[in-house]
């Protein structure tokens, strides 16, 4: 069967080539002689060459309209990957995706910047999921300790960023006594850096971490029988 189709293909090509030779050679000779016949032949060939270009231009114009201006490919839903629950709802509200706008015209960089303004979000990447979905991939901050602030308790990550306020400290996190204002971010980062560097068996014996400044981190053991003072501390990895 394959040989049969191959033979048919060769036959069609041979017929096309034969017709091209039978028509092309006389027309070429006539066009080379100049005069009115030659001009008519060259003009007709120019028109025939232009037709595919016009068709391609029409196709490109149609695609531009479909993608950028029609209602066929509009953003009608948002998919959030990496988080769920309350944080996912908070991300969707912050993203403020203009539903109903053509998907190609959604400013994904602006959406990503709005999502990253959520304190609990470490990074966010926004992409288009054709034909109608805006995809937001979120990497949440990892809590390492609880910090008390003016409005309750916060979780704090390795960079010292506060997020996810609550009325009580997280039961599964150590308590970090450190400034909760913007100026205290380095002190918080030093404190949680110690937390991240401690082995889990040692961390379980820590009642709280005190970090009044980036250069002084104090670990208070649960039995309060001993205290460890690390001073100075320039890097959590060096603890």
Image (cartoon, helix red, strand yellow):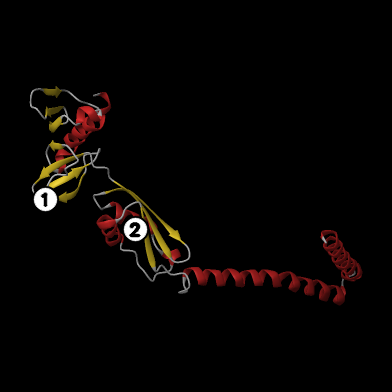
Mark 1 sits on what residue?
167
Q: Which mark is residue 199?
A: none
Mark 2 sits on what residue?
111
Q: Residues within 10 Å of mark 1 (few under 14, many from 20)?
A: few
Q: Quadrant of residue 183?
A: top left
Q: Quadrant of residue 81?
A: bottom left
Q: Position of residue 188 (x, y in %)?
A: 18, 36
Mark 1: secondary structure: loop
Q: Which residue sits at x=16%, y=29%?
A: 205
Mark 2: secondary structure: helix
- Vertical side of 143 occupied by 203: above or below: above
Q: Are marks 1 and 2 in contact (CB under 8 Å)?
A: no
- Residue 204 appears left or right of 61: left
User: In this view of the protein, which residue sits in the foreground, 104 or 5?
Assistant: 5
Q: Position of residue 164 (x, y in %)?
A: 20, 50
Q: CA distance from mark 1 to mark 2?
A: 30 Å
Q: Quadrant of residue 1?
A: bottom right
Q: Position of residue 26 (x, y in %)?
A: 92, 70
First reached walking from the N terminus: tag 1 or tag 2: 2
């Amino acid at each position: 069967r394959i040989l049969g189709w191959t033979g048919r293909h060769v036959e069609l090509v041979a017929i096309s080539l034969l017709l091209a030779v039978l028509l092309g050679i006389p027309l070429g000779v006539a066009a080379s002689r100049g005069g009115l016949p030659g001009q008519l032949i060259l003009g007709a060939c120019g028109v025939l060459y232009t037709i595919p270009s016009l068709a391609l231009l029409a196709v490109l114009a149609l695609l531009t309209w479909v993608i950028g201006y029609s209602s066929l490919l509009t953003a009608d839903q948002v998919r959030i990957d990496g988080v769920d629950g309350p944080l996912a709802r908070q991300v969707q509200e912050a993203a403020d995706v203009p539903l109903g706008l053509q998907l190609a015209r959604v400013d994904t960089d602006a959406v990503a910047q709005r999502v990253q303004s959520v304190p609990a979000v470490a990074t966010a990447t926004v992409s288009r999921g054709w034909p109608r979905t805006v995809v937001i991939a979120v990497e949440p901050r990892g809590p390492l300790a609880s910090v008390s602030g003016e409005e309750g308790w916060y979780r704090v990550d390795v960079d010292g960023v506060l997020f996810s306020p609550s009325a009580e400290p997280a039961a599964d996190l150590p308590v970090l006594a450190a400034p909760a204002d913007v100026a205290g971010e380095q002190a918080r980062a030093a404190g949680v850096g110690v937390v991240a560097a401690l082995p889990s068996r040692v961390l379980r014996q820590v009642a709280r971490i005190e970090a009044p400044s980036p250069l002084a981190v104090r670990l208070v053991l649960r039995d309060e029988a001993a205290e460890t003072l690390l001073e100075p501390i320039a890097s959590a990895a060096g603890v």
